[in-house]
Amino acid sequence: MKKQISLWLLAASLSVGMPAMAQTNELPRSTPEEQGVPSKALTALFDSLHALPLTDMHAVVVMRHGKVIGEMYPQPFAPEYRHTMYSCSKTFVGVAVGLAIADNRLRVEDRVATFFPELLPENVSPELASMTVRHLLMMSSGVKPDWNMRSRGTEWIRTFLAKPVVKPGEYAYDSMVSYMLAAIVQKVTGKKLTEYLQERVFSHMNVTEWAWEESPEGVNTGGWGVHMQPESLAKFGQLILDEGRWEGKQLVPAEWIREMCKKQQETGREVYGYHIWHCGGHDGAVRADGALGQYVISILDKDMVVVMTEATLGNGRDQRRLIWDVLLPQIQDEPLPANKKDYQALMKKQASYKLPEVKGKAASAFASNFENKEIELGKNPFGWKSLRLNFGKKQVTMTVTETDGKSYELPFGYQQWMTTSMEAYPPYSITPIDRFKGLEGPYYVSGSYAWTSKEELQLKAHYVNWVSSLEMTFRIEDGEVKLNVQTNYIKKPYSIVGKMK
């Protein structure tokens, strides 16, 4: 079975040009039973996660005692693909702050205003003057969160410092607070967080295939923007679990990891450390947590790491509850007897997971109404000026022309996922100025199609080294093309009107 999986991945990489430097299969592997976990428990967990409503699982990696004991990558996703991690990035910021403190560049009680004297407002309030690095780490800056600030201007530090500040100390979750920490670390070290963490941490863990978005000011975005492969994320989770050690070397001071993971702030529902969450329902676990269900969970008292990348419009607590209810009760302190039957069933199941293709017919006579005709689109959030559809045997090719004049083709397979690369940017659920700055393409897209009725064509595209997917439904009504686009990050679909040329 392992050989079959490897051959499939090799074929896929050759067909679409997957990243040649993909860092996969570096962590040691083990049977679950050798690490005290029944294979059946992992199968049950994976089945339950895969079946969650309003959710597409992209990757799950489970480690125990430093070894991978289970992993799933539902097609068309694969281990080689990076994933954008949204607010999981904040925990990377927390580690970088700890390194700067260890280097005597920074203290948690340092005043934020002292780092940027040239960017301060003319009148510095006592509240702004009292704001410390520790307040930022605890999400208690005293600044009211303004989630659109990053989409309106380019001077993010100056704008943040000019905001009204109430007495710091009260919890208010804010990605711009993490950005300020990233800017402070860059100011005191002279290095972007990507450079600093690569030099001090990730080079020792053989993690080089990662990136982080940058602001218009040339600072890593801090509160979001890390782009990393699932196995590398598992390494990061293991680093937290082992209190900053990797293969016997102390990369991050253990006392700082312990301080990060301590209860620092009550949020009303959960407990927050220094840019890392406690896991409600299981006191011995902490997590990096990102939008749409991105998780790096370090279960300290079970010596276990669980990584999940996905796109969910459901409640992410359901995913975590499955770990507590389905997996953890089955774990034993000692190795279990080998169970070849259950382990082989797990291996077979891991290789079989697939996100659903579009259901319907392969062809329709109505295709002639679209064939090779340019569809000029009205205003839309995707930057599309026009589309063109071409129909082959069990394949549809959509040519996209963007408003800047650039064009690319996306293939869609019938009852299969067809994958290609593109240099264009994928859809994104947030709109900061200079988004994608600091990241390099190409981006990979997998497509499936079907005629869901005689006159309705549906295309599904997963941007597999990102997070987004689009479900596009084409109809012709009253001489106009009606295009409905459902994203996996907003529940309400977009309705776009097009005209055939």
Image (cartoon, rainbow, N blue to C red):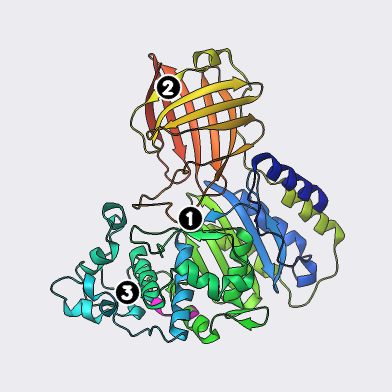
**Residue interval drawn in magenta:** 261-265
Residue 91 showing in the rendered view: no
Q: Circle 2 — which element?
A: strand
Which residue occupies the extreme front position in the image? 190
Residue 422, given in percent of the width and then of the height, sits at: 54, 40
Residue 44, given in percent of the width and then of the height, sits at: 69, 56
Q: Circle 1 — which element?
A: loop
N-terminal of the pair, mark 1 or mark 3, is 3
Q: Amino acid at mark 2?
A: Ile
Find the distance from the CA under tag 2 to the CA under tag 3: 50 Å
Compare residues 395 and 30 and report the one nearer the observer: 395
Dot in front, 2 or 1: 2
**Residue that numbered label 2 is attached to:** 375
Residue 206, given in percent of the width and then of the height, sits at: 64, 68
Compare residues 291 and 491 and report the one nearer the observer: 291
Q: Residue at x 65, y 41 (%)?
A: 16
Residue 4, given in percent of the width and then of the height, sits at: 80, 47
**Res. 139 image quadrant:** bottom left
Q: Residue at x 62, y 22 (%)?
A: 361
The disc label shown at residue 315, or none? 1
**Residue that numbered label 3 is attached to:** 140
